[in-house]
Structures are given as structure tokens and as C-alpha cells.
């Protein structure tokens, strides 16, 4: 193989590695943004439940779905992998659950409650199963829907 071709091959390998590093850095940044969105949503949902009347419980469930739909679709379009949309959806819901209960526990501590963490850990573990399982299922559903519509646009 001539030396020029070999150097071109090495250069293209370096470019490929650099592209991979950029893609990896961008996906890490997306996941940090997803964590921030989940944390902010958990605190906002606490206040949303306070202002919402009890007979609008369905609206409270719907607001959690509104959170996941754009994240699952965006992650599916950005990465092209359904499993990443699943992970992103479960991560956002899990972060929202943890931030919701941490915020609630801190509010109780400031009101003078002594032992707030005993019940909180039980609530967090119960709802974490829902967040991870439900987030994964909803992420998969919207990733598959997104994949189907993306395939139609390309074809």
C-alpha cells in the first residue's frame, strides 16, 4: 500500500474517533439535560398538585405523560435507537420522583417534622418501580411510533 493511502486511512480513523467522541459528549449532555428537566418537574409537580382540585386526578397523571412524550421523541430522533429513548424516559421519571419526595421531605423538615425520611424512602422505592417500568414502557411506545413515522418520511 502506498504511503499516501496509509496516511489517508489513519486520518479517516482519527476523524471517525473524533466524531464518535463528539457524539458521545452530546449524548452525555442530553442526559444531563434530562436529569435537570426531571428534577425541575418533580418540584413543579408538587406545586401543581397543591393547586389542582382532588377531582382532577386524571390531569395529574396526564401531566406526567406530557413530560415524557417530547423527551422520548427527541431522543429517538437524536440517537436513532429505541433503547436510548427508553432509558431517557425512565431516567426523567425517576429523577422527577426523587426530586418530588426530596422537596416534600425538606418542606416537612422546615415545618418541624422530626422523622421524615422513614416514610419517604418507602414512597420513593414504591414510585421508583412505577417510574422505571412505566417510563420504559412509555418511552418504548413513543420510540416505536416515532420510528414508524420516521421510516415513512425517508421512504
Image (cartoon, rainbow, N blue to C red):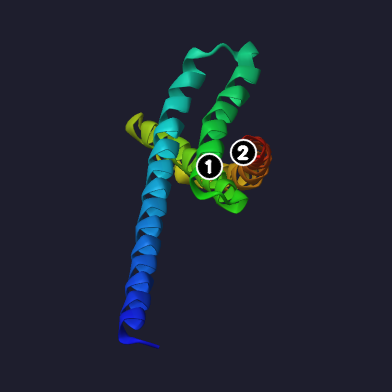
Q: Are marks 1 and 2 in contact (CB under 8 Å)?
A: yes
Q: Is residue 101 left or right of residue 126?
A: left
Q: Which mark is residue 8?
A: none
Q: Is residue 56 at least partly visible in the picture?
A: yes
Vertical relation: 83 (above or below) 54: below
Badge 2 marks a residue whose secondary structure is helix
Relative to the observer, which residue lies in front, 8 or 118? 8
Which mark is first along the chain, 2 or 1?
1
Q: Quadrant of the C terminus?
A: top right
Q: Which x, y percent locates residue 77? A: 53, 42
Q: Residues within 10 Å of mark 2 (few under 14, many from 20)?
A: some
**Residue at 31% of width from left, 81% of height from top?**
4
Q: Is residue 50 left or right of residue 54?
A: left
**Residue projecting furthest to the front:** 2
Quadrant of res 113: top left
Q: Name the residue carrying label 2.
A: 150
Instruction: Tell me if residue 153 comes above or below residue 57 in the rendering.
Output: below
Q: Secondary structure at mark 1?
A: helix
Q: Position of residue 151 (x, y in %)?
A: 65, 41
The residue tagged 1 is: 77
Count neighbours of disc 1 (C-alpha within 10 A) and say few if under 14, some if 14 to 19, many if 20 or more: some
Per the model, the C-alpha gap separating discs 1 and 2 is 8 Å
**Nearer the observer, 17 or 92:** 17
Amino acid at each position: 500500500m502506498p504511503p499516501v493511502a496509509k496516511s489517508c486511512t489513519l486520518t479517516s480513523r482519527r476523524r471517525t474517533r473524533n466524531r464518535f467522541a463528539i457524539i458521545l459528549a452530546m449524548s452525555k449532555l442530553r442526559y444531563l439535560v434530562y436529569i435537570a428537566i426531571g428534577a425541575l418537574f418533580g418540584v413543579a409537580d408538587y406545586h401543581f398538585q397543591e393547586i389542582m382540585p382532588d377531582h382532577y386526578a386524571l390531569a395529574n397523571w396526564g401531566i406526567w405523560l406530557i413530560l415524557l412524550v417530547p423527551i422520548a421523541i427527541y431522543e429517538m430522533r437524536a440517537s436513532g435507537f429505541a433503547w436510548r429513548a427508553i432509558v431517557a424516559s425512565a431516567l426523567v421519571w425517576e429523577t422527577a420522583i426523587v426530586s418530588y419526595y426530596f422537596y416534600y421531605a425538606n418542606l416537612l423538615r422546615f415545618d418541624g417534622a422530626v422523622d421524615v425520611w422513614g416514610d419517604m424512602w418507602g414512597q420513593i422505592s414504591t414510585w421508583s418501580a412505577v417510574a422505571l417500568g412505566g417510563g420504559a414502557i412509555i418511552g418504548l411506545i413513543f420510540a416505536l411510533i416515532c420510528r414508524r413515522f420516521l421510516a415513512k418520511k425517508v421512504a
